[in-house]
Image (cartoon, rainbow, N blue to C red):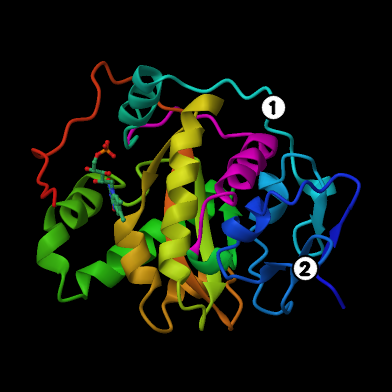
Amino acid sequence: MSLITVDESKCIKCELCIKECPVAVLKMGKIGPEDRETTTCIACGHCVAICPNAAIDNKKAPLVQQVDLKDFPKLNAQQAEHFLRSRRSIRNYKDESVSREKLAKLIDIARLAPTAENSQGISFVVVENKQLIEEATEITIQMIENSPLRHLVEAAVRSYREDGVDSIFRGAPNLIITIADKNLRSARDNSVSFLTYLELYAPSLGLGSCWAGIFEYCASIEHSPLLKLFNIPEEKKITAAVMVGYPKYSYKRLVDRNPLEVVFL
Ligand SMILES: Cc1cc2nc3c(=O)[nH]c(=O)nc-3n(C[C@H](O)[C@H](O)[C@H](O)COP(=O)(O)O)c2cc1C
């Protein structure tokens, strides 16, 4: 069965759909584009999205599901730079939980990020129960205390044990965990891509976020008790995590980094 359908009255045979296809599934036939075969299609939707006349449809990326880009106001270069450079890791949160509606919107945008071969394959566990997050802190600290990496996070362990300071989740009201099938090859890359979108979008909802790297490390250890705590199905693994909440303070200056290192050839 054919993957694509073409409205002959609209198709101008510009071949953009063919040129755009990342896996060369399409070719020009006698009356318009055709698919060579259907299994290789990665459902990226480019063939449908690029068509100037909405002449092509693809079963794996239906036209009806694609949103028209017509009136999209582009950020200028300065706005785009400012947008990207004003995201910061947030490590102090207001004592206020985030509505489920906002959390759902956040992950709904995150899932639009690019992934290897459009494989996606990432699902979310959204933790709204602060007590669970506190239990995860205790378990993470215990795991780190008994880990050869303890010396790397000695101060975090001590501040927790001596003063009750949570350096793992920073008192954030919510935690967003990505999970994937154990055998998904690009699981970590895809998760990083998703959560990078999430981090960039969060300030638009008034939210802040921060990666939970120590937790990620402990959750990725085989048979980690953190998997049980969050009810992660047997066939899944935790691939990444960020804490989320309303920032208590605001940053006054933009991100800076090490000097740029580059070779142009
Ligand atoms: C994979 C990854 C893991 C991270 N883990 C932690 C963490 O465990 N705790 C933390 O406070 N920040 C963590 N961060 C945040 C980085 O420290 C932060 O991005 C970096 O210092 C730059 O600061 P900025 O995000 O404010 O620009 C992590 C970031 C990444 C990308």
On screen, residue 149 versus residue 27, left or right, reads left
Q: From the image, tell me which residue sits under label 1.
A: 70
Question: Quick one: which residue is furthest to the front in this view?
Answer: 30
Instruction: Say left or right for 226 vs 33.
Output: left
Mark 2 Cα shell of 10 Å, populated few (<14), some (14-19), many (≥20): few
- Residue 87 location, x and y as percent? 35, 31
Label 1: few (<14), some (14–19) or many (≥20) C-alpha neighbours in 10 Å: few
- Identified by mark 1, the residue type is Lys
Q: Which residues are magenta?
A: 91-115
The answer to whether one can see residue 126 in this image is yes
Give left or right: position of 93 versus 207: left
Question: Which labelled disc corresponds to residue 29?
Answer: 2
Name the residue rendered at 29%, 60% in the picture.
214
Question: Which image quadrant is residue 36 in?
Answer: bottom right
The structure residue drawn at horizontal position 75% and vertical position 44%, both measured from the top left corner, is 66
Q: Position of residue 56 (x, y in %)?
A: 80, 53
Secondary structure beneath dot 2 equals loop
